[in-house]
Image (cartoon, rainbow, N blue to C red):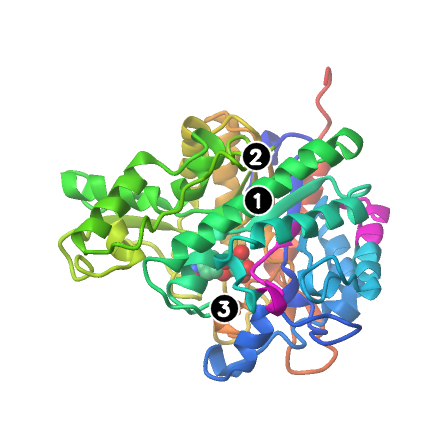
Amino acid sequence: MSGLDVSVFPHDFAWGAATAAYQIEGGWNMDGRGPSIWDTFCHAKGRVFEDHTGDVACNSYQLWEEDLKCIRQLGLTHYRLSLSWSRLLPDGTTNHVNPKGVAYYNKVIDDLIACGVTPMITLYHMDLPQALQDLGGWSSTEIADIFESYARFCFKTFGDRVKLWITVNEPYVCAKLGHEDGIFAPGIKNPGISVYLAGHNMLRAHTKAWHTYNTHFRPLQAGQVSLALNSDWVEPLDPGCPKDATAAERYKDFTLDWFACPVFCTGDYSESMRARIETRSLDLGYKQGSRLPRFTKSEPSPLGTADFFALNYYTSRKVKDLNDGSKKNELSFEGDQGAEGVVDPSWPICGVHWLAVVPDGLRKLLKYIKDMYTSLPIYITENGFSQMGPVQIEDADRSQFYQDTLQEVGKAISQDRVNVKGYFAWSLLDNFEWSDGYSVRFGLFHVDFSTPELKRTIYRSGREYAAVISKHHSQPKPKNI
Ligand code: PNW
């Protein structure tokens, strides 16, 4: 990454890396932690690559200090981690608090701050307490209030030191992969129905948590709260084909806009998304009411419930029309969407099949967010490159990927005038990559999962990321600011 021009990044740019509790902590039944839906999902055989589980993962629950060394070695200014809800509240409710869980996160937060690293904390990163799933999980109306109590507990307990909060990570992925496709926990396959309900309740939960923070904590704690939305950059497959152009719009309606429109634009789902779902319900003879729930006047509106835009970007897609395709008569999310995202053959695939490397898609998406949604600051809360097969510590291709991507972020800042405040590489460590288990490695540090020590070794991309951060910090600070 030595060719990267770091002068375009603001002097207080957040240089970060991200992780998530279930993917790194392990200690799944230690010290009073309650089970989460991912424990259940992994322990049922046949769902995750070679039946891998997060039982031990990187053992960050016991090896936090090793993680801290990695963070320091990179010279990160920010570290994004998530809290395990069921480690703090084993049955998901504030009726039972696990003091050892509180002590663990207090130490992590205190150590970070003592090292000059700013924590960004995600409250929910895919790992619902199993006890709450047993009550209906994200499909139940009550979950929003239960989440609000959990959020309130976290703000009260950690908010004196934590100033950057993410309520829910990637509601799209949780809803779609967990409640439509069934390939993520809780493994529900209820096409065309649960996906919208789960997404809706995540938005309600986020909204309530943001309002609680805004009213009760912001005056004293002065922090910021958002939700992390994942999005691909998309363009029509054939730009000259009107059907593909409309399909690309529909694709956006059902991905980023599904969550961004209620929070950043109107307080509701887009008219086009609603109309599409209603029409198809009629066409398919679905009569049990609207599949896309409505926000009610008795609850606070999601509009304006983000203090910054948190974006997870991994890849891009070309979109082709699927309106008359095989899903036309199928009650499903993809049938509703009527569009398919395909990979351009010129894009290299890195590791996992879905991850086509398209760094300039990030620049385009950043500008799109600024133009379409908000002038609020943007944090790129995840972005990364995966490895599969033999381990390559000298990961030249991943280093090149980070250089190219950061170059595009730089152009978004200097040429497109997008207010990008920070960048979090996914991930600090190789970790449990959900249904792919440990077969896919996203880390800036390699983790040797074959021995109990779980030794961390920096990849070349980690060394080069550290060099970028240090080069940026050795720049003279601008005067007059
Ligand atoms: C994100 N897909 O999820 C998550 O926030 C991380 O926990 C995860 O490790 C990372 O991306 C890398 O996958 C995704 O199948 C999971 O398209 C799956 C997909 C996309 C994002």
Earlier residue among tags 3 and 2? 3
Circles 3 and 2: CB distance less than 8 Å? Answer: no
Instruction: Kindly identify the residue that appears in the image at 39 percent across and 40 percent down.
Output: 257
Kind of residue at badge 2: Thr
Tell me residue 150's x, y (percent).
Answer: 69, 52
Query: Residue 441: where, in percent of width, then height?
Result: 54, 67
In the image, 295: left or right of 443? left
* Residue 472 placement: quadrant: top right
Q: CA distance from mark 1 to mark 3?
A: 20 Å
Q: Position of residue 160 (x, y in %)?
A: 82, 41
The residue labelled by disc 3 is 186
User: Residue at point 45% right, 57% down?
Assistant: 175
Look at the numbered discs 1 and 2 and tell me whether their residues touch, using CB distance below 8 Å. yes
Q: CA distance from mark 3 to mark 2?
A: 27 Å
Q: Hey, what amino acid is under mark 1?
A: His
Magenta span: 109-132
- SS label for mark 1: helix
Quadrant in the rendering for residue 326: bottom left
- Residue bearing the label numbered 1: 206
Which residue is disc 2 drawn over?
305
User: 337 and 77: which one is in front?
Assistant: 337
Seen at 40% across and 48% down, the residue is 232
Q: What separation in Å lies between label 1 and label 2 (alpha carbons)?
A: 8 Å
Determine whether the residue tagged by mark 3 lies in a helix, strand or loop. Answer: loop
Q: Are marks 1 and 3 in contact (CB under 8 Å)?
A: no
